[in-house]
Image (cartoon, grey):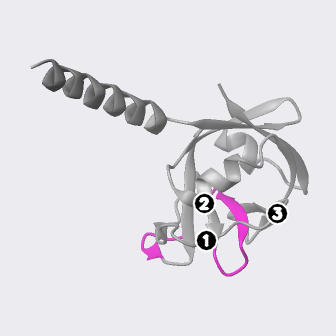
C-alpha cells in the first residue's frame, strides 16, 4: 500500500510539473517605451527563440501587413509544427526565409504551411502597426 501511495504522489508531482511547464509564457517587445505583449506557443521553434532572449531586433515593414526581422542566429525548423492562418496578431517564422514576423493585418483565412506559429499578440498590436519606418525593439521574457 505504501508503494502504491508513493506511486500516486510521484505521478501527481510529475503532472503538476508538466502543467507548470505548459503555463502561458509571454514576451514583451519594447518600442520607444511602448510595449507589445505576446503569448507564446509551446513548440520546438519557440523554445529556440526564447533561448535568444533578451535581445534587440531590427524590424521593417513587409507588404503593408507584417513587421519582419532576422534572428540573431539560425533556428532549426525540424519538428516545428507547420501551418498557420495568417491573421492579425500572429507571430511566426516564415520557413523559406527562416525569419521572424508579426502580422498586424490579416493576410489570409486559409492555413499556410510555410508559416510556423510562435505566438499571438495579447496587447499592443496598435503600437506595432503604427511603426511607419524600420524600428528597433527590445524583446524579453515576461516573468
Place of residue 8 in the rendered image (x, y in percent of width and height, measured from the top left):
20, 26
Q: Secondary structure at mark 1?
A: loop
Above or below, 31 against 101 in this view is above
Q: Secondary structure at mark 2?
A: helix
Q: Which residue is mark 2?
A: 45
Which picture quadrant has residue 6? top left
Query: In the shown orientation, is residue 57 left or right of residue 84?
Result: right
Q: In the rendered structure, are the residues bearing label 1 and label 3 in contact, judged by CB atoms less than 8 Å apart?
A: no
Q: Which residues are magenta?
A: 95-112
Query: In the shown orientation, is residue 129 left or right of residue 8?
Result: right
Place of residue 23 in the rendered image (x, y in percent of width and height, measured from the top left):
46, 33
The residue depicted at 65 percent of the width and 25 percent of the height is: 143
Taking the magenta stretch, the answer to whether it contains residue 123 is no
Q: How many other residues sit within 10 Å of disc 2, few (<14), some (14-19) or many (≥20)? A: many
Question: What is the CA distance from the residue labelled 2 to the residue labelled 1?
Answer: 6 Å
Q: Total label count? A: 3
Numbered tag placed on residue 73 in the rendering: 3
Query: In the shown orientation, is residue 103 left or right of residue 5?
Result: right
Above or below, 40 against 70 in this view is above
Q: In the rendered structure, are the residues bearing label 2 and label 1 in contact, judged by CB atoms less than 8 Å apart?
A: yes
Name the magenta segment's main secondary structure: loop
The residue depicted at 66 percent of the width and 69 percent of the height is: 76
The residue depicted at 22 percent of the width and 28 percent of the height is: 7
Q: Earlier in the sequence, mark 2 or mark 1?
A: 2
Residue toward you, 46 or 111: 46
Q: Which residue is mark 1?
A: 77
Q: How many other residues sit within 10 Å of disc 1, few (<14), some (14-19) or many (≥20)? A: some
Taking the magenta stretch, the answer to whether it contains residue 109 is yes
Amino acid at each position: 500500500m505504501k508503494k502504491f501511495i508513493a506511486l500516486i504522489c510521484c505521478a501527481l508531482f510529475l503532472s503538476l510539473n508538466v502543467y507548470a511547464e505548459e503555463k502561458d509564457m509571454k514576451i514583451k517587445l519594447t518600442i520607444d517605451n511602448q510595449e507589445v505583449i505576446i503569448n507564446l506557443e509551446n513548440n520546438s521553434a519557440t523554445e529556440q527563440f526564447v533561448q535568444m532572449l533578451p535581445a534587440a531586433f531590427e524590424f521593417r515593414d513587409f507588404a503593408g501587413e507584417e513587421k519582419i526581422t532576422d534572428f540573431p542566429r539560425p533556428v532549426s525548423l525540424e519538428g516545428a509544427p507547420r501551418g498557420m492562418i495568417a491573421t492579425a496578431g500572429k507571430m511566426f517564422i516564415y520557413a523559406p526565409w527562416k525569419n521572424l514576423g508579426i502580422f498586424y493585418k490579416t493576410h489570409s483565412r486559409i492555413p499556410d504551411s510555410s508559416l510556423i506559429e510562435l505566438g499571438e499578440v495579447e496587447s499592443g498590436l496598435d503600437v506595432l502597426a503604427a511603426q511607419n519606418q524600420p524600428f528597433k525593439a527590445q524583446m524579453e521574457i515576461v516573468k
